[in-house]
């Protein structure tokens, strides 16, 4: 194992902001953020439609604010083919709703609450993610 | 007020994803590539988020109600069941294949990247299929 591209300071600062968002949403609106829950409820549930929509709009505005107000250049790279994106998208959408949480819902909100369910979910998807990358590298 | 809070929290979350670079799937795959060339950054993002949210959650959960809403809405599901485990395995597989999870995927729509648009479309289909399963 070699460590590369490690950016601890920006990772920590970004993480603090995400934690701030989660806790403000809890103290003010009374809900714990889970992006998969908010997104799927926006699409499927009838309750709190506008509240969920505005959170998602904010998620998209975040990068735009970084680019146009702070002049930050954002680089992303996705090299996956369309069939792979299809499989990955369905697996992420279906899996997060079957287990009622994703990286934010289980990994941050759930662990903050010391929820055993969320701790087990987070360990599971991390291990499976690591194994998936390991297998992809071999193939 | 609820709606303004939602928008602002979304923006803060999105900026956090940009600053931490978690919006970039290559960065996430670097974290999952623990046996080869490892980028531990994602762990620091989680630590950063948890050191803010954990103590404050336990401090404020004692309040009667949130500031702009009538009551706290928190899952009281404690069951460790097949759905939790199978769902997490399927999610972990998709996450490891592409490097995108729901937050960064939606946030990256801002960049008009065709791959993330396709991913979010198929993820939404996944949400629909799961909602039929949950009935």
Image (cartoon, coloured by chain):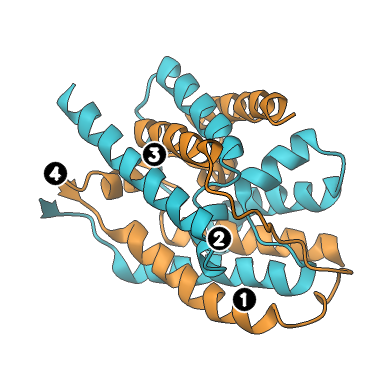
Residue underneath mark 1: B57
Same chain for marks 4 and 3? yes
Image-quadrant location for residue A84: top left
x, y (%) of residue A121? 46, 48
Colour cyan maps to chain: A
Name the residue: 34% across, 61% down. Answer: B43
Using the rendered view, name the quadrant where residue B129 is placed.
top right
Q: Residues within 10 Å of mark 2 (few under 14, many from 20)?
A: many
Q: Position of residue B25 (x, y in %)?
A: 39, 42
Q: Nearer the viewer, residue B106 or A69?
A: B106
Q: Which residue is most to the top? A: A83
Q: For mark 2, give the secondary structure.
A: helix
Q: Does residue A104 appear in the picture of this structure?
A: no
Residue A115 location, x and y as percent? 54, 62
Q: Secondary structure at mark 4?
A: loop
Disc 4: which residue:
B36
- What chain letter is assigned to the residue under label 4? B
Instruction: Tell me the distance, in whole angstroms, between the alpha carbons under discs 3 and 2.
Output: 21 Å
| Foreground disc of the pair 3, 2 | 2
Image mark for residue A110: 2
The mark lying in front, picked from 1 and 3, is 1
- Compute the Cα span from label 1 to label 3: 29 Å
The number of discs equals 4
Q: Residues within 10 Å of mark 3 (few under 14, many from 20)?
A: many
* Rendering colour (chain B): orange
Tell me the tag on residue B99. 3
Give the structural element (helix, strand or loop) at label 3.
loop
Badge 2: chain ID: A
């Amino acid at each position: 194992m070699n460590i590369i591209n490690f950016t601890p300071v920006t990772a920590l600062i970004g993480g603090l902001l995400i934690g701030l968002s989660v806790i403000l949403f809890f103290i003010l609106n009374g809900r714990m953020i889970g992006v998969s829950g908010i997104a799927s409820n926006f699409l499927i549930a009838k309750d709190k439609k506008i509240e969920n929509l505005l959170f998602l709009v904010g998620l998209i505005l975040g990068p735009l604010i970084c680019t146009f107000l702070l002049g930050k250049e954002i680089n992303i790279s996705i090299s996956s083919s369309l069939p792979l994106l299809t499989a990955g998208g369905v697996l992420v959408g279906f899996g997060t709703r079957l287990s009622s949480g994703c990286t934010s819902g289980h990994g941050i909100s759930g662990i903050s609450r010391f929820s055993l369910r969320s701790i087990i979910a987070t360990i599971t998807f991390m291990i499976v993610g690591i194994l998936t990358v390991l297998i992809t590298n071999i193939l | 007020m609820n709606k303004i809070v939602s928008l602002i929290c979304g923006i803060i979350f999105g900026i956090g994803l940009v600053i931490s670079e978690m919006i970039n799937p290559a960065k996430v795959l670097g974290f999952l590539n623990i046996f080869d060339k490892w980028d531990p950054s994602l762990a620091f993002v989680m630590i950063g988020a948890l050191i803010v949210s954990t103590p404050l959650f336990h401090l404020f959960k004692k309040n009667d109600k949130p500031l702009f809403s009538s009551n706290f809405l928190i899952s009281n599901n404690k069951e460790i069941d097949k759905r939790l485990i199978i769902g997490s395995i399927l999610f972990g597989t998709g996450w490891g294949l592409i490097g995108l999870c729901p937050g960064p995927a939606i946030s990256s729509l801002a960049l008009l990247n065709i791959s993330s648009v396709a991913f979010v479309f198929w993820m939404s289909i996944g949400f629909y299929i799961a909602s039929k399963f949950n009935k």
